[in-house]
Image (cartoon, helix red, strand yellow):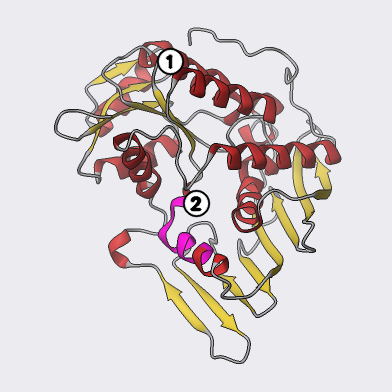
Amino acid sequence: MGTADGRVRWGILATGGIAAAFAADLVDLPDAEIVAVASRTEETAGAFAERFGIPRAYGRWDALAEDADVDVVYVATPHSAHRVAAGMCLEAGRNVLCEKAFTLNTREAEELVSLAQERGAFLMEAMWMYCNPLVRRLKALVDDGAIGEVRSIQADFGLAGPFPPSHRLRDPALGGGALLDLGVYPVSFAHLLLGEPADIAARAVLSEEGVDLQTGALLSWESGALASVHCSLHGGTPVTAAVTGSLGRIEVPQGFFYPDRFVLHRDGQDPEEFRADPADGPRNSLKHEAAEVMRALRAGETESPLVPLEGSLAVMRTLDAIRERIGVRYPGEDAAPRLASV
């Protein structure tokens, strides 16, 4: 899918920080064209459009969803709005790249996947970590047995804060808390290497508003492998990861989900360092996930093998299980989605 000259025309839904970062990286992709942006107001959409040279700005989400000139929409709203925003776009026949966490819960994620399949549309969670070339190299090494059978994984993501009660990260109505915003990375890292866990234990510190300020979880697999994952909104953590196997281990330093290097330790051998290719661009680039979406669209695929939909559903099931164990529930989770014109 795309224009006659092979270009893929993007629409961007929402205008926050992650949307701006994504738009800036799209500008650097020669075959990508941003043709429209939507926000809740014409003013914010117009300012974003002027900043990035986007020809059309909409003050309503449904106007972007109905723009037939758009090949794919990048949904960059808070995850509490993903079901409505992505669903609106899929209903209108647009392909969708939806930010993570994919949705608030598994039910919403399953609804989006079913909707995409009914429409024959492309849908992908924006788990950029999975598209990072160095992370892909790490996975290939693990899959090829470089460290033997995986025994354990450790990964963390914590921010120092403090975040006031008014901040979106502490707002239950916006799906606040450490788990869905930060914990999705350690959980997804474990899923990438081991798949869906067989059992889950978790503990958390909750805020007065009822969202998690700090969560730790122990995931276990029938193979005997364990993963310890941690996320926090009131403590800056190393943001590192390690994978230990029967024949060695891999250590990923600060920023494990967008690494510039990792070290492979094989038993009885000198450590081997793997570094990111400078040609791949800045380590925090979102262009790799955008390029994967464009590749898939041109190939006529409805999902990406790098970020498969079943994998996104499995991660959501794990996040749901952790929330059940720590006692976090969001307003209106049991209500049917409201497909409003916003």
Asked if residue 105 shows in the view, the reply is no
Identify which amino acid the numbered label 1 is placed on.
Trp
Q: Residues within 10 Å of mark 2 (few under 14, many from 20)?
A: many
Residue 82 picture quarter: top right
Depicted 318 relative to depicted 244: above or below: above
Judge whether residue 138 is colored magenta: yes
What secondary structure is the magenta-colored segment mainly? helix
Identify which amino acid the numbered label 2 is placed on.
Tyr
Q: Which residues are magenta?
A: 131-139
Q: What x and y, as percent, mark residue 165? A: 70, 33
Depicted 98 relative to depicted 281: above or below: above
Q: What x and y, as percent, mark residue 306? A: 47, 48
Residue sitting at x 67%, y 34%: 176
SS for tag 1?
Answer: helix
In the drawing, what numbered circle is on residue 130? 2
Question: Which residue reaches farthest top?
Answer: 341
For disc 1, the marked residue is 61
In the drawing, what numbered circle is on residue 170? none
SS for tag 2?
Answer: helix
Judge whether residue 185 is colored magenta: no
Q: How far is disc 1 from disc 2 in space, using C-alphas?
A: 28 Å
Residue sitting at x 67%, y 46%: 162
Residue sitting at x 53%, y 57%: 257
Asked if residue 25 shows in the view, the reply is yes
